[in-house]
Image: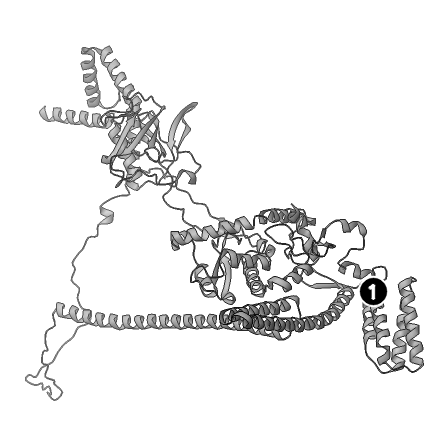
Amino acid sequence: MSERRETEEQEVKEGEGQNTETTPQPGESTAEQPPEDDGEPRSDGGQVKLESWTAGEFKEAETQADVNDDTEQLEEPQKTPGDGKCTDAVETVEEAETQTDLPDDAERLREHQRKDNVGNSTATVKVLLVPEGHVMTVAFAIGLSIEELKRHLASELRVPAEVLQLSLDGRAVEEERSLMELGVRPHGSTRMEMSSTDPTVHPLRPLRPPEQDNMPDVITVRVQTDEGVFQEVVVEIERPRQQKAFLGGYRHRLTGTEYRNAAVQTLPKRRPDGGVVVFSRDTQTAELTRQAQQCPVNASTQTTRGGCYVSHLKDKLVVPGNYITADEHHARRLRAVIRLQSFVRRWLARRQVEALRRDRDRRLAWLEMQERRRTEEKEEQLRDRRQRWRNPQRREDFNLLYHALEKWRLEAEQRINSSLRGAERKAALCSLLERETQLIATIGRHRIAAQESNYDQAVRRLLDKSAAPHQWAAADGRLIQMETQHTLRARQLRDLYNNQNQTTTDQDQRLQVLMTLKHTVKEHTCQLTRDIVDLIDREVDLMTRGVKAANLAGLRERISTLFLQYIKTPAFNPEVARLLKVPQNPSQLKDGMFFCRGCHRYLQFADFSPSASARLSGRCRDCAGLDNIARSRHDVSCYRNILRRLRDDELRLNRDAKIPVLLQAEDVRYLVEVVWASRSALNGSRDLYSLVFVRWDRRRDFSPWNCILLSKEETSAHMEVEDVHKVYEATFIRGIEHKHTLARRHFSQFSVMDEYLDSKLATAPGNQRVSKPVTMATGEHATDITPALAH
């Protein structure tokens, strides 16, 4: 009987152990709030975190789910037939309950279950980090204590829980109290302040800035728990600590858009349990057995005996050697391995040293090539400067001569003032003035000769442009040329003009050219053509009388001049109309015309030198050049080279850059001399042939307030700087920013020009961007920015 009674008591205990309701622990899911369908576990305080489950966590959650299911079934106990022992035990329990006060116990049981369900309900807790002002939002069970909330927040902020201090409405909250005791209702919200008792060592900073993410911290998900029954669950969003792994993808060949494979952070659907235990010690344990084996080959030996003789001539005396223990064997192998490793390491070290030596040689060769290139570039500029001194052809060349003359005069005047006094000084200054006058006259004669030569080249260039066929690039890159009747007419007139200007001694050939010219101009009747015909008849008459060719030079020059005027008339040569500076339509003259205060003439915008810092200067190019010769005598050739280098570098970085194109040589001169004091910002070099402008912050486009003047040796190192505030000192940065402020104030009109050019490009036909930016120098594009300058 005692054994049977012990067996029954054990079975009842096992049944009670299987059906006993488990008290939910912090972080576990309860029957009132089931977990979501995706199988994600809850962390401390009932928060739902989007992270992967381990095998142990998944098994524990499954076991807990089974316990919860059993708990729900135990709310209405039923008798299980077929088990007499369990039935007797249940009847015994029912009899014991019948003898007690059944209504009071049931009421207390339901009240206890209701409190447990309410305590496991979640609420939204907004925590304000003091003094940073950041707000953290978490979902927490209202039945848990403030101490558990502090531990959860400490793990999120990665600080010790002892340094955290929570307060509600300005009063500190006790750690043993729960959110429900503080008046927080289920699915409600509250706001607390949290500070650190040691802000120096453990400051409160959020792990991610709030501006990096627009997702909410807590969302409410509506979950279907039963057919037609829905329940709202508060879910906290947890951000990943790192970027998702790259799982491959592909790229569009035409557009270049990249498409990447998607990644998920949820586990695949779990297979149903088949009832077979797959985790067993037997399948993971290897059993070792010991078994003897017989050699498959038999062997025998023969020795000398009676009736049998075995020769000993080939016998060998075997002497046992030294016995090698296992430690000695392994030690010898270790020494051999170490020796092999030493040779391998020596070989690897030699390879690394040779690679470093090759890199050093390449680096030295590159530096030498860069230095040689910079030296050759400077020598080329100096050779070009000397060549312009010897053979001046352009206006800039004569400005260089006048600049050198002014520099020589100042040096000579300073030498005279420092060494002579009284009458000797006055005589020396008079001699210096006479010498300066002679040099100015010499430069003037060279200028007149150059103007004559340049006039012939300009006329020839004008005729070649008018006779050239129309060209444009096709879609496949080929250059297409088209001849029109106007281009053929311009080519005929050009050839006739060249034949008329040729010097020939053959009278018949000259007469043939004159007759062709006469018939060509007689196609149109006007005063100009009648004058040309009269001059041709006069030359033919003089040639028939035997007048020498030298005496006819003036007459032929008049014929050439009138015929050139005939060619420049659009009525006789329509193709030349697009090359003339003065438009033939009088209505177009009222636009783009400005008054010169120097020569008191109305001229086109192309005859002026606009400045990017203000409006027009009020004087045309000729007046400005005459004033430069007479007084200032500046030379901007060095600044023009700096500007050319700047434009090439910026167009290589940004094809649509407009500010480098808007800059002129005078603007670069102002930047170099006034803003940057004609020296490098780093080493103070004053060699204008080695100074260049580069971007101050390479991530932004070039502008006068985003540039720095450096030598050519320093540009490569500066362009590698990612953040200038981390490389340069604060004093140096403040000096650069001061120079940028001066440049921004002087070049304030650049913003107006930039906006005007953007609007012009946006309203262009077909909304196509021009391949060559609009320039401010000369030509037909010069009038495009006139409204911006007049603004």
- Identify the image's colour scheme: rainbow, by chain, secondary structure or one colour: one colour
Which image quadrant is residue 576 in? Answer: bottom right
Q: Residue at x 81, y 68 (%)?
A: 491
Position of 790 compared to 541: left or right?
A: left
| Vertical arrangement, residue 52 with respect to residue 250, above or below | above
| Vertical arrangement, residue 523 with respect to residue 283, above or below | below
Quadrant where the image shows the C terminus: top right
Count the labels in the image.
Answer: 1
- Residue found at the far front of this picture: 423
On the image, numbered disc 1 is attached to which residue?
565
Quadrant where the image shows the N terminus: top left
- Residue found at the far left of this picture: 306
Position of 260 compared to 113: left or right?
A: right
Q: Residue at x 21, y 25 (%)?
A: 16
x, y (%) of residue 643? 57, 61
Disc 1 packing (10 Å; few <14; some 14–19; many ≥20): few
- Residue found at the far bottom of this picture: 313
Visible residue check, residue 77: no
Q: Nearer the viewer, residue 403 or 748?
A: 403
Q: Residue at x 65, y 48 (%)?
A: 788
Q: Amino acid at mark 1?
A: Gln
